[in-house]
Image (cartoon, rainbow, N blue to C red):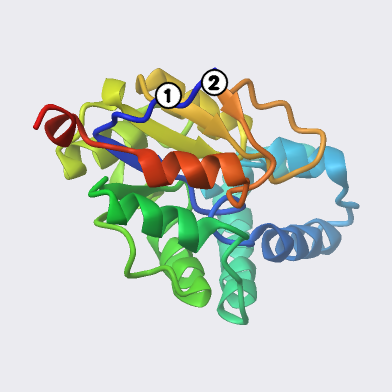
Amino acid sequence: MTVPRTIDAVVFDCDGLLVETESGWTRAETAVFAENGFAFGPAEKRLLLGGTLESGGAKMAGLFGQPASAGPALAARLAELTWKELRAGAPALPGARDLVGLLGDRGIPVAVASNSSRRLVEVALRSAGLEDLFEVVVTADDVDHGKPAPDLYLLACQGLGADPAHSVAFEDSPTGVASARAGGLFVVGVPSVPGTTLGADALYGSLADPDLQAWAAACTSPASAHQ
């Protein structure tokens, strides 16, 4: 399916999409699993991918055979280890800066909508040198219901003054794709974990894909399209 070029806004996920955070998350997740006597592999990664810290803590408690009340402590431990990993360095993924810059050159508003906490999103964007590129950044701290609920995408579009039905989302996880679709956005999938099935409206292997870069360079807003 062709990505629409006349759009109100573009909203990006952060982890694994704009910033190479997945290796840091994986090291932190592996450490938490090891602390609780469990191995961490591809199946566990797919289970946690794209979820909130809260949901991750609940899933880990279940996997570890611990009571649900252990979930918040597990989530807090994962958050602290991940923050340390991202603070040590998390580069922008190929094509991220160029794609966002091209959209900015075309006057297309851009936002970040992330299921991570604001503390983790801010350190990730700062580590990647992307912190000044977005007009709006919304995180799991800003909504009652994270992805796959549509709240984050709806809030991001509201902050940009954009109609979700005339906006495009970029996602790397099934949870994120479900969220953006529930919000009514056109969804471009760029999977961060091999073998992940996204079910997006359009699929690319990287933000650096020449077709995506050409798309960004040709985007227009509805206002400019009618001038």
Residue at x 50% of width, y 21% of height: 2
The amino acid type, in three-letter code, at marker 1 is: Phe
**Residue furthest bottom in the image:** 88
Around disc 2, counting alpha carbons within 10 Å, would you say few (fewer than 14), some (14 to 19), or many (20 or more)? some
For the image, the number of numbered tags is: 2
Q: Position of residue 185 (x, y in %)?
A: 38, 24
Give the residue at mark 2.
201
Secondary structure category for the residue under label 2: loop
Q: Quadrant of residue 64?
A: top right
Measured along the vertical axis of the image, is residue 139 above or below residue 19?
Answer: above
Secondary structure category for the residue under label 1: strand
For the N terminus, the quadrant is: top right
Q: Is residue 82 left or right of residue 212?
A: right
Between residue 170 and residue 28, name the one nearer to us. 170
Q: Position of residue 85 (x, y in %)?
A: 65, 74
Q: Position of residue 28 (x, y in %)?
A: 71, 64
Measured along the vertical axis of the image, is residue 54 above or below residue 147?
Answer: below
Q: Is residue 148 visible?
A: no
Between residue 149 and residue 92, name the one nearer to us. 92
Q: Quadrant of residue 62?
A: top right
The amino acid type, in three-letter code, at marker 2 is: Asp
**Residue furthest front in the image:** 227
**Disc marking residue 186:** 1
Q: Position of residue 122 (x, y in %)?
A: 41, 67
Residue at x 50% of width, y 53% of height: 14
Labels 1 and 2: the sequence-earlier one: 1
Between residue 112 and residue 60, name the one nearer to us. 112
Measured along the vertical axis of the image, is residue 126 above or below residue 156?
Answer: below
Q: Is residue 106 visible?
A: yes
Residue at x 54% of width, y 20% of height: 201
Around disc 1, counting alpha carbons within 10 Å, would you say few (fewer than 14), some (14 to 19), or many (20 or more)? many
Is the residue under label 2 in contact with that under label 1 (CB below 8 Å)? yes
